Image: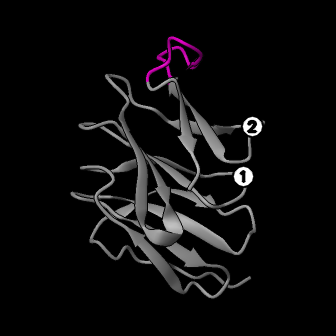
Amino acid sequence: MEQTFLHGLGGGGIGCLTMHPSGKLFAVGEICERPNVFIYEYPSLRLVKVLRNGTEAEYATLKFSPDGGYLATVGSYPDLMITVWQWQKEHVVLRSKAFSQEIFLILPVPQRHPDHLRYRAHSLLEDGDYLHGPEAPGRDRKIRGG
């Protein structure tokens, strides 16, 4: 089996990675000052898009929406910013502060209406449990599709 290495383009390391639902793309979030999210084709590794200014220091997690049209990113300390992108246009459709706890998991929540997208943020507590529901930082966020 052959290995291929991707070097960070912004000078930092890789903080997180997620696959697109099609299996033909993946997104990489950097760890560095003013990190970027790079979206690559798979298996060619051709750079497709660069998402900028989503967080200050590093990305903790990334997740594509089930239809692949949106990408949710979560920044780590110090800004703890949740950003939802219409990634093909490199456009931010939602930005929200995650308050005081770092979020390590963000999941799309199924919706009845096809023009809505909803994410639920989860924080990992000291005892290993997830904080979720109404008391979770960031709670559910609805986005009306464009």
Report the disc number at residue 66: 1
Residue 82 location in percent, x, y? 41, 40
Q: Which quadrant of the rendered structure holds the C terminus?
A: bottom right
Residue 37, quarter of the rendered image: bottom left
Q: Which quadrant of the rendered structure holds the N terminus?
A: bottom right
Q: Nearer the viewer, residue 128 or 71?
A: 71
Which secondary structure lies at badge 1? Answer: loop
Residue 26 location in percent, x, y? 60, 68
Q: Across the whole image, how many numbered discs are drawn on residues? A: 2
Residue 143, quarter of the rendered image: top right
Q: Nearer the viewer, residue 19 or 48?
A: 48
Residue 33 location in percent, x, y? 21, 57
Q: Is residue 101 magenta?
A: no
| Label 2 sits on residue | 110
Q: In this rendering, is residue 143 above or below 136?
A: below
Query: In the drawing, does residue 8 fall left or right of residue 131?
Result: left
Residue at position x 73%, y 61% from top?
21
Q: Earlier in the sequence, mark 1 or mark 2?
A: 1
Residue at position x 63%, y 88% from top?
44
| Prevailing secondary structure of the magenta residues | loop
Mark 1 residue type: Pro
Magenta residues, as a range? 124-137
Tag 1 near tag 2, CB within 8 Å: yes
Say few, some or many: other residues with alpha carbon within 10 Å of mark 2 (under 14 / 14 to 19 / 20 or more): few
Q: Nearer the viewer, residue 86 or 34?
A: 86
Q: In this rendering, is residue 1 above or below 128?
A: below
Q: CA distance from mark 1 to mark 2?
A: 9 Å
Q: Which coloring applies here?
A: one colour
